[in-house]
Image (cartoon, rainbow, N blue to C red):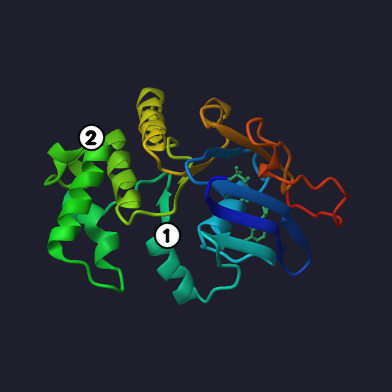
Amino acid sequence: MSEIKIQMKNISKVFETEDMETHALKDVNLTIYKGDYVSISGPSGCGKSTLLSLLGLLDMPTSGEYKIEGVDVSNLSLDEAAEIRNSKIGFIFQSFNLIDQISVFDNVALPLRYRSEAMSTTEIEQRVNKCLEMVSMTHRAQHKPNQLSGGQQQRIAIARALVGDPAILFVDEATGNLDSNTGDQIMDVLEQLNQNGTTICMVTHESRYADRATKQFKLLDGEILTTPTNRESNVNNTVEESEEVLTTD
Ligand SMILES: Nc1ncnc2c1ncn2[C@@H]1O[C@H](COP(=O)(O)OP(=O)(O)OP(=O)(O)O)[C@@H](O)[C@H]1O
């Protein structure tokens, strides 16, 4: 049995405003194993961003249990969440979020320099070089991000997400700012990383990208609908009617 990296049990998220409640996620059960390449896709408003925010510890669920590598992270303080985010989670966004004033090397090194446990300069150098190699960008280490193409910048963002050796890489519409050729190349990089052992969970509304993952989940109205074909036990669909849902859509 493979090692479990991510486990969500009965995760719900309710947004309350003055006059309405939105049940953005309803009893989501999701297990991601070491080495998985998972995609979660669905139409606008189905809860993709909400789910990714919870997975990435950018927000906390209203109810349910969430574990990363067996550690319960369902109810963390902001500081605890930041610490775990920096050590266990790699995140790739649509916008690359690189700092143009410092070199590519220093951008990738940044998460290591923010760790509470200091890391030696040699170890930082080794890790950064290894990650730049993984995305074929060693030759651009001393450039500034704004001297690179969009695709190259996204590769640097991927290297930065991997440098802390995270339990999992979360990918949020990574190709949204790229033309389709460059987007495809970024998808090739992700596929290669997965083949070399990186666990990936990608959220996307583009079915042609979702299809490239080895396990595909569909999200609709806050519920996970499909069971991936290659591992039946991975998700436990909730079929009962949930409470009335008031959405803003
Ligand atoms: N902060 C919030 N307050 C109130 N409602 C919210 C909030 N964030 C999201 N929602 C609602 O939760 C539901 C799910 O939203 P979410 O942004 O997760 O969808 P999505 O699938 O990412 O959509 P898109 O593909 O358009 O980005 C929507 O009905 C949305 O209006």
Q: What label does residue 106 carry, if any?
A: none
Seen in the image, is 188 located left or right of residue 247? left
Question: Residue at the spot x=54%, y=31% of the render?
Answer: 214
Examine the rendered structure and indicate whether residue 51 appears above or below residue 86: above
Residue marked by disc 2:
136
Question: Residue at the spot x=40%, y=53% of the render?
Answer: 90
Q: Residues within 10 Å of mark 2 (few under 14, many from 20)?
A: some
The three-letter code of the residue at mark 1 reads Lys
The three-letter code of the residue at mark 2 reads Ser
Question: Residue at the spot x=43%, y=69% of the render?
Answer: 82
**Pointer 1 or 2: first along the chain:** 1
State the SS at label 1.
helix
Query: Taking the image as drawn, is residue 6 in sight?
Result: yes
Between label 1 and label 2, give the one nearer the viewer.
Answer: 1
Residue 80: give x, y in percent of width and height. Answer: 46, 74
Outermost top residue: 181
State the SS at label 2.
loop
Q: Is mark 1 within 8 Å of ligand 1?
A: no
Residue 156 sits in which quadrant? top left
Residue marked by disc 1:
88
